[in-house]
Amino acid sequence: LAPAVTVNATGTIGEYALVIGTDYTVTYSDNVNAGTAAATVSPAANGNYTFTVVEKTFTIGKAAAPTVADTTARYRFSVSGAQTVALAGLPANAGTMSFALGTVTDGSGILSGTPTVSADGRVTFTLAGQAAYQDGLTATIPVKVTMQNYEDVTVDLVITLINKDTPVVSAQDVAVTYTGTALTSDVIQGTASFGGEAVPGAWAWVTDPATMVNANEDG
């Protein structure tokens, strides 16, 4: 941020404005983040005027609090032990940040002990582990984020227990030559893994394969 600076001189012909770059120069310091910044006005080298260097401070205010979506984490209901999740979606130009834990909501009792939040926005919590799956097993850990360049915002870490693990799935594009017959699922090639290990299973078309006969149809 570099607000405009004007310099006026008073002489025998009255008051008149000097020309920046020709008569004077302006340099700025600490003018990137919110807080107190400074503008320093100096006589231009080889200019026609001389005066004492002047420094003026100005304030850069914080921007309005950003809208930050919940950070979500999903675990199989039987998982227990310590887990760590980094808060997501905070603005890259937030400046320095600090984090404070809010009041945890855990009506399902899926957490054990008190969560913590680190100086870099990583939330550590302990899952108690459940003997059986039930719908609605969630907990919310709110974290107040104080930022240098924005007003404070609260980010919720929402933890949900699920019945089955969700693997990472990758499928190759399918390109076949028209034959007039419906495609079978054996042309699908891909992988599924969880925790770095392959997950066995079978591929199937979302669309009824009997309808995928003509060229350029998707399934």
Image (tube, rainbow, N blue to C red):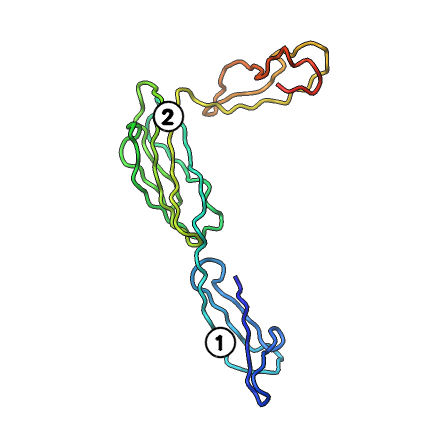
Nearer to us in this view, 70 or 176: 70
- In the rendering, at what x and y percent does residue 22 appear? 63, 76
SS for tag 2? strand
Q: Is residue 5 above or below residue 76?
A: below
Amino acid type, mark 2: Leu
Q: Which residue is mark 2?
A: 161
- Residue 211 lies left or right of residue 133; in this view the side is right
Q: Which residue is mark 1?
A: 54
Q: CA distance from mark 1 to mark 2?
A: 62 Å
- In the rendering, at what x and y percent does residue 43 appear? 56, 78
Q: Is residue 42 above or below residue 133?
A: below
- In the rendering, at what x and y percent does residue 146 appear? 38, 50
SS for tag 1? strand
Q: Is residue 11 above or below residue 30?
A: below
- Residue 145 lies left or right of residue 93; in this view the side is left
Callout 1: 10 Å neighbours few (<14), some, many (20+)?
A: few
- The residue drawn where x is 35% and y is 40% is 142
Q: Is residue 181 above or below residue 169?
A: above
Q: Which comes before the other along the chain, label 1 or label 2? A: 1
Q: Quadrant of the C terminus?
A: top right
- Residue 47 lies left or right of residue 147; in this view the side is right
Report the number of discs: 2
Callout 2: 10 Å neighbours few (<14), some, many (20+)?
A: many
